[in-house]
């Protein structure tokens, strides 16, 4: 599905979690690439963190009713939000709730880029709610890319060669699972919005020793897409069965399933 444009002839991209450590470089990258860029923040004073010309939209990602203005006319949404740890309430409200809330108020189809984390399929409270957010995106019928980055900025200066893995097999919960620069995470998230080769693909993003690639299309192209009609990423292990999910999660999946299909 191509990005639709507004009267400005520019695609309009909303960054959720814009003030975070990945959100800030993602806003800058989207703006640099020529998108009409919106940064979703709770405090308008955070505008100073972004380039002049970025549109600041105020809302609370845990409250859907505050997000209508943020998503109005958006042709792409990049999710860079998230919290760590095992605070069940916080993980549900932020890691999962933000995805549900934004999708629930979208008025028209938009291209989605969702950032979660390497190791997201290793069961834990925080991971499980991130994974449920992934499932909402896949069920929605929207074009999407799901990026699971390694440990932020743990890479050495000569570790810039990007590698896209699938199956989420690295569960050490340490930098041995993979490392990648924040700037490169932002680059991949933004690039995925305009790439047909990245559509319906889920991958872990890490960097190995070597120089950075200038063209990401070959990396996207070789990956298999997520299974049609499924809830999980290509090659993910089946260790979060839908039959055992909370009824509220099943209800949310039913509500979003196919909502935006042509």
Image (cartoon, rainbow, N blue to C red):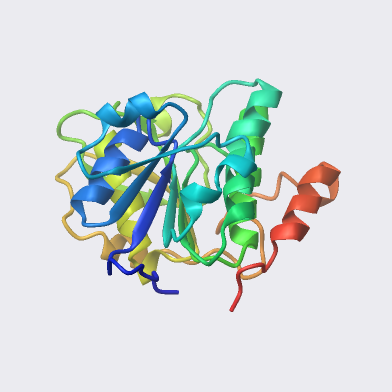
Residue 184 in picture, x, y percent from top left = 26, 42
Residue 169 in picture, x, y percent from top left = 52, 42
Look at 21% across and 36% down and name the residue there: 159
Q: Is residue 15 above or below residue 41?
A: below
Q: Is residue 214 above or below residue 88?
A: below
Left or right, residue 96 beside residue 3: right
Q: Quadrant of the C terminus?
A: bottom right
Residue 110 in picture, x, y percent from top left = 48, 63
Of residue 179 and residue 30, the one placed in the foreground of this image is: 30
Of residue 3 and residue 92, the one placed in the foreground of this image is: 3
For residue 201, say whether it is visible. yes
Look at 66% across and 67% down and name the residue there: 259
Q: Quadrant of the N terminus?
A: bottom left
For residue 122, say whether it is visible. no
Look at 63% across and 37% down and name the residue there: 63
Of residue 180 and residue 32, the one placed in the foreground of this image is: 32
């Amino acid at each position: 599905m191509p990005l639709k444009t507004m009267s400005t002839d520019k695609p309009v991209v909303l960054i959720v979690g814009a003030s975070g450590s990945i959100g800030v470089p993602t806003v800058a990258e989207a703006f640099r690439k020529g998108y009409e860029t919106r940064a979703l923040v709770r405090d308008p004073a955070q505008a100073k963190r972004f380039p002049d010309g970025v549109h600041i939209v105020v809302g609370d990602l845990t409250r859907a009713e505050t997000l209508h203005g943020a998503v109005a006319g958006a042709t792409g949404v990049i999710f860079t939000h998230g919290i760590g740890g095992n605070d069940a309430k916080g993980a549900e409200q932020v890691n999962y709730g933000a995805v549900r809330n934004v999708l629930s108020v979208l008025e028209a189809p938009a291209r989605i880029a969702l950032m979660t984390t390497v190791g997201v399929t290793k069961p834990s409270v925080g991971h499980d709610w991130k994974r449920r957010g992934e499932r909402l995106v896949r069920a929605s019928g929207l074009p999407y890319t799901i990026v699971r980055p390694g440990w932020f900025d743990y890479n050495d200066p000569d570790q810039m060669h990007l590698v896209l893995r699938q199956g989420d097999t690295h569960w050490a919960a340490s930098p041995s699972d993979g490392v990648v620069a924040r700037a490169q995470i932002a680059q991949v998230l933004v690039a995925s919005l305009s790439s047909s080769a990245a559509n319906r693909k889920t991958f872990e993003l890490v960097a190995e020793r070597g120089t950075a690639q200038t063209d990401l299309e070959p990396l996207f192209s070789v990956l298999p897409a997520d299974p049609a009609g499924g809830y999980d990423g290509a090659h993910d292990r089946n260790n979060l069965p839908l039959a055992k999910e909370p009824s509220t999660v099943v209800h949310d999946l039913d509500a979003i399933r196919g909502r935006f299909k042509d």
